[in-house]
Image: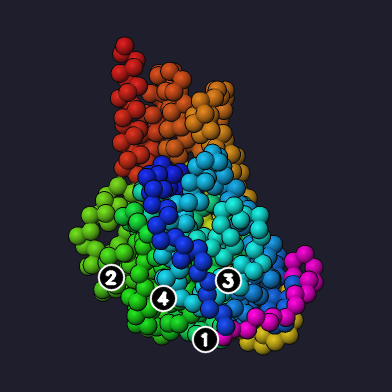
Amino acid sequence: MLKMFSVKHIIIGLFSLVLFTSCGIKKSLNDLPDISNYNSNIPAKVIVNDSTSYAGNNFLTKNKQGLWELYVEGDPLERGLLIGSLTKDLMYKQEAVFFDKISELVPSEGKQKFLRKFLSWYNRKMYKHVTNEYKSEIYGVTQYASTDFNSIAPPYLRSLYLHGAHDIGHALQDLALVGCTSFASWGNKTEDGKLLIGRNFDFYAGDDFAENKIIAFINPTTGYKFVSVTWGGMIGVVSGMNNQGLTVTINAGKSKIPLIAKTPISILTREILQYASNIEEAIIIAKKREVFVSESILVGSAKDKKAVLIEVSPKNFGVYEVENTNQLICSNHFQSDAYEDDRRNEKTIKESHTQYRFERMQELLTESDKINPTKAFAILRDKNGKDNKEIGYGNEKAINQLLAHHGIVFQPEDLKVWISSNPYQLGEFVAYDLNNVFSNRIGNPSKVSISEERENIDKDPFLLSEDYHNYEKYRVLERKVEYAIEEKTKLNDEDLERLVSLNPQYWKAHKLVGDYYYQNQKYSKALKAFNVASKKEITTRPDAEYVTKFIKKSQRKLKR
């Protein structure tokens, strides 16, 4: 998925669009869903303690692994109101984190004002591409949203915009994608012959953004019951499974910069999860909606006993099914015939890290032979490169880039799911059985987790290692060095030496040292650092070309 640098791209790359901000915005600003047929009366919230509250049969509770477990039922407005009531504090925290990040990236009040105008203009048609059901649910949620962020937009519009933030961000970020990787195995590729799906969701908007994950169990009046991994204020789906054993996960593809927002991908996948029971039904729903970015949707189906990729983009649509194998891999490029001659897709394969991760996943699945849940967790936690090469912690060529919002494993035919707890996908994987979660949901919630505790998977031993603690120190120091380079402030040589010693196999550590020394006209030290970086596993072709360029520039400087 993506790192949170997209706001700068919006400001720099699309500034001219502010000229059009008055065109066609009024209708979108005034649009509200029709809630006349829905129930607006919900039970009062009862607060049991800091980690548990309920309203009728609906509840929010925090388990011992730190995951918030949410259960709501009812029509769209009821669901929204209940989600808003129960998760009000979590929604506030999430918005605060998100908008603090924007303020950090765009400190200028003038540019922030432009950004608000841009969002109004860019999202002016989104309301036409979100069904009344989901607009009503969002509207209900936002009745409990804070007014502290009204300078961005009023709560309902703000929430609608945020549901498209993923799409806007990855479309405007060119090759700065952080790659999600997923796989599905079935038949002779799994120990029990049943479908098994694993994925890492590598959306990174800062550590605080992933702090309060919500495992939402939704029981709608129409459609199927489902579980989704989400966060405060988000009703869309990035990873989920319904009670028919249908799963959806999303992987970003390379997009042309869209000129207008349409259906957010997470809303499309929400509709698939709620209303499809098999692959054919999922395809029909996906074909109905106009999207504004490119995305691979991995759909697994207990009824079909297999998985496929639905590959959508603004002007193309494809379905990819594997032939002569029972194993499907998805990274960040398209594989269906519909995209065979797509130049952006070809460029992504050549220049980014998507093909590398695809091949690494092939290796891991081959090494594991027949997959079971335990092997799936180990694959999602793998930090090495191809041929088990050490490529540095945090390298985007790894399956586990040590920044995932969550890792998840599905067993659709048994309606079982395992979801990682913090940090990244290294914490304990918590098991849930949808058969049990959605049965006997009458009365107040129990004071214990609704998870299947005996089936939980232990945290990664890596968490207790010196390498992990060094990596966390490295991340802090990396930000310090990046800031010094950006702001042209001075550092001690000891900081630079420590940066590479904390993560010696990571190309970026050496590249940053080279950048700092080159900026400060210490060309001999810069050349040495760039030369070391060039021998490491560099993430993308543009990154490798950058390092090569500065090796030559440093050499020229030394010859003068």
Q: Which mark is residue 222?
A: 1
Sequence-wise, the earlier of marks 3 and 1 is 3
Q: Marks 4/2: CA distance?
A: 16 Å
Q: Secondary structure at mark 1?
A: loop
Query: What residue is pinned by disc 2?
Result: 318
Looking at the picture, does residue 278 appear above or below residue 353? Answer: below
Q: Marks 3/4: CA distance?
A: 30 Å
User: Crowdedness of circle 1 by 10 Å Cα count: few (<14), some, many (20+)?
Assistant: few
**Residue placed most toward the observer, 477 or 108:** 108
Residue 20: where, in percent of width, then height? 38, 52
Q: Which mark is residue 300?
A: 4
Q: Marks 3/2: CA distance?
A: 33 Å
Q: Amino acid at mark 3?
A: Tyr
Residue 306: where, in percent of width, then height? 37, 78
In the image, the segment drawn in magenta is: 37-52
Disc 3 vs disc 4: Cβ atoms closer than 8 Å? no
User: Crowdedness of circle 3 by 10 Å Cα count: few (<14), some, many (20+)?
Assistant: many
**Residue placed most toward the observer, 505 or 270:** 270
Q: Amino acid at mark 2?
A: Gly
Q: How is the image coloured?
A: rainbow
Name the mark nearer the viewer: 4 or 2.
Answer: 2
Sequence-wise, the earlier of marks 3 and 2 is 3
Residue 342: where, in percent of width, then height? 23, 59
Query: What residue is pinned by disc 3?
Result: 139
* Residue drawn at x 50%, y 51% as measured from the top left: 116
Name the mark nearer the viewer: 3 or 2.
Answer: 3
Q: Secondary structure at mark 4?
A: strand
Queried whether the magenta region covers residue 45, the answer comes back as yes
User: Which quadrant of the structure image shows residue 333?
Assistant: bottom left
Q: Marks 4/1: CA distance?
A: 21 Å
